[in-house]
Image (tube, rainbow, N blue to C red):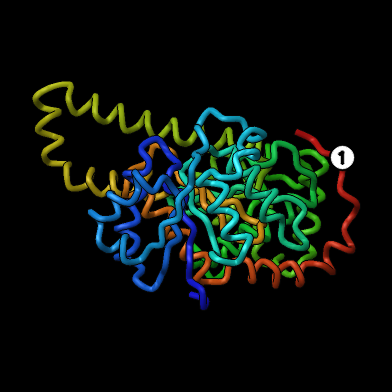
């Protein structure tokens, strides 16, 4: 990790904060003893929890935050809460006191505050929300997951660049394959912005990694390591995938409880089912990243537990450790000749 090695933590964000935040911090502190944490939260509530978690206490500096952003608060209102734990944690990144921030709080507020306070990296038009998911061939990353409902071809190209760096940085892939999500794999399919983005990528330095267009079924199949799309489509795909996984878990539970023979079958199949459960455990994939900003920003699911929150911190630490933003800057510099030869972006489409 770089010299500072500090993460800012919103201790009051999430459905069960600050309890699960501090319990997750205890796990992260054991995994990453070299990292320091700046905790922002209600001192009266957080300090007793730290006293019960020695590793978290030793690795952390607690700063009192008199306010917290409620889950139902609109982003515009959250911007006015200058003393909220979320705002103070993001301010610490902007001031150079920390290299990244992790919060399980209000998603809209976190995105709005991070974009306004941290601002986008030079060469990035819009930040994107990226997340990891399971496929038949291993983990993949998809972006955008909802930060940008409307995108043009330039945005999609930038998402591809950031996704490729993410796959190398976090997933450890040397040559991650990239696909543009489309209504068909044929070159003439899709609207103008998707076809324009494809032409830019084909002419760019990352062309050898560009698979081309992929369809919805390719996501779970693991056809590519990086799935690129606009925020509207990505969010729908994300929620559909989450719903499908929940349905599968519920159906398996129902089937194995349906009869004595089924219960006996469960006993025999239990080791394999445990492996499946671990593979599909949503806590393993907890943590969506707002990429393209001057600082690492990780959004944990608000309803996660301590293990899930620790995974979100693992994600932030990996990105800092591997100089994620510096790699994006390097890749954008390589991409500029291809972008200069590309047609002007088409008008935004949903």
* In the image, residue 125 above or below residue 216: below
Instruction: Give the number of marks.
Output: 1
Q: Position of residue 225 (x, y in %)?
A: 54, 56
Residues 179 and 53: in front is: 53
The residue labelled by disc 1 is: 347
Is residue 138 in view from this perspective?
Answer: no
Question: Outermost residue, bottom direction?
Answer: 3
In-image side of 124 versus 72 (left or right): right
Residues 17 and 211: in front is: 17
Q: Position of residue 260 (x, y in %)?
A: 9, 24
Residue at the image point whose x is 71% and y is 65% from the top: 207
Residue 44 falls in image quadrant: top left
**Structural crowding at the residue carrying mark 1, measured as other residues with C-alpha within 10 Å and reported as few (<14), some (14–19) or many (≥20):** few
Q: If the image is split into quadrants, where does the C terminus sit? A: top right
Residue at the image point whose x is 70% and y is 69% from the top: 329
Residues 237 and 182: in front is: 237
In-image side of 322 versus 192 (left or right): left
Q: Position of residue 155 (x, y in %)?
A: 75, 50
Residue 273 falls in image quadrant: top left
Residues 312 and 48: in front is: 48
* In the image, residue 237 above or below residue 298: above
């Amino acid at each position: 990790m770089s010299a500072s090695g500090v993460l800012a933590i919103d201790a009051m964000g999430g459905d069960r904060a600050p309890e699960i935040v501090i319990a997750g911090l205890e796990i992260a502190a054991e995994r990453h003893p070299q990292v320091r944490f700046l905790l922002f939260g209600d001192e009266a509530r957080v300090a007793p929890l730290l006293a019960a978690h020695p590793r978290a206490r030793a690795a952390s500096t607690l700063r009192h935050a008199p306010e917290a952003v409620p889950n139902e608060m609109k982003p515009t209102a959250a911007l006015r809460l200058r003393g909220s734990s979320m705002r103070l944690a993001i301010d610490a990144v902007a001031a150079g006191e920390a290299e990244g921030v992790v919060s399980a709080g209000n998603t809209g507020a976190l995105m709005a505050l991070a974009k306004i306070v941290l601002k986008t990296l030079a060469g990035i038009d819009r930040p994107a929300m990226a997340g990891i998911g399971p496929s038949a061939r291993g983990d993949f990353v998809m972006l955008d997951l909802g930060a940008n409902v409307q995108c043009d071809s330039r945005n999609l190209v930038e998402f591809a660049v950031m996704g490729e760096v993410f796959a190398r940085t976090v997933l450890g892939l040397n040559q991650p394959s990239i696909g543009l999500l489309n209504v068909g794999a044929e070159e003439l399919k899709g609207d103008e912005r998707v076809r324009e983005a494809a032409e830019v990528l084909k002419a760019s330095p990352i062309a050898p990694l560009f698979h081309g267009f992929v369809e919805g079924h390719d996501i779970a199949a693991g056809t590519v390591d990086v799935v690129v799309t606009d925020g509207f489509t990505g969010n729908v795909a994300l929620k559909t995938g989450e719903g499908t996984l929940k349905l599968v878990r519920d159906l398996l539970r129902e089937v194995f409880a349906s009869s004595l023979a089924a219960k006996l079958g469960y006993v025999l199949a239990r080791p394999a089912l445990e492996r499946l459960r671990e593979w599909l455990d949503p806590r393993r994939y907890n943590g969506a990243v707002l990429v393209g900003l001057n600082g690492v920003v990780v959004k944990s699911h608000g309803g996660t537990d301590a293990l899930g929150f620790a995974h979100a911190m693992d994600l932030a630490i990996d990105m800092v450790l591997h100089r994620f933003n510096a790699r994006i800057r390097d890749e954008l510099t390589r991409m500029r000749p291809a972008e200069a030869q590309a047609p002007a972006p088409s008008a935004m489409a949903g």
